[in-house]
Image (cartoon, helix red, strand yellow):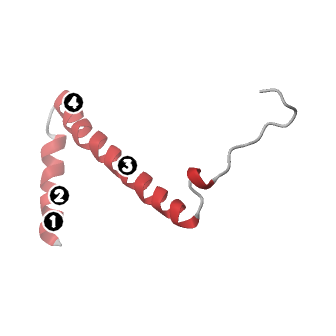
Amino acid sequence: MNQIASWWDGAELWLIGLPYVPQLLLVMGVVLPAAFGIARGFDLVLARVFALLGRDRASVPAPTVVGGEH
């Protein structure tokens, strides 16, 4: 665990030593894909959980129109 913490500290120090624009590009190049991947993973997991519970969109009946006008 100490090796991971030491590596992380070194990476942080290297990152904050960079000028602003390279910092921004590097962080966005890592954070945006990571956030997208995490969101996609949650979406897939929750879709399967809802499907197992019978609460997915396919199992919800479409609303009916009362009154004859569409």
Labelled disc at residue 20: 4
The amino acid type of the residue labelled 1 equals Ile
Find residue 8 and name its label: 2
63 above or below 19?
Answer: below
Q: Is residue 58 above or below residue 28?
A: below
Sequence order check: which comes first, mark 3 or mark 1? Answer: 1
Residue drawn at (34%, 44%) of the image: 36
Residue beneath the point at 14% across and 51% down: 11
Q: Position of residue 67 (x, y in %)?
A: 88, 33
In this view, the residue in front, 47 or 13, is 47
Contact (CB < 8 A) between labels 4 and 2?
no
- Left-right relation of 32 to 55: left
- Report the disc number at residue 4: 1
Identify which amino acid the numbered label 2 is placed on: Trp
Residue, far bottom: 1
Q: Secondary structure at mark 1?
A: helix
Cβ atoms under marks 2 and 1 closer than 8 Å: yes
Mark 4 and 3 residues: CB-CB less than 8 Å, in contact? no
Residue beneath disc 3? 40
Give the residue type at disc 3: Arg
The secondary structure type at the circle numbered 2 is helix
Give the mark, 2 or 3, whose residue is nearer the N terminus.
2
How far is mark 4 from mark 3, CA to CA? 29 Å
Residue occupying image coordinates x 17% and y 56%: 9
- State how far apart marks 2 and 3 are (Cα): 26 Å
* 4 to the left or right of 48: left
Per the model, the C-alpha gap separating discs 4 and 2 is: 20 Å
Between label 2 and label 3, give the one nearer the viewer.
Answer: 3
Mark found first going from the N terminus, 4 or 3: 4
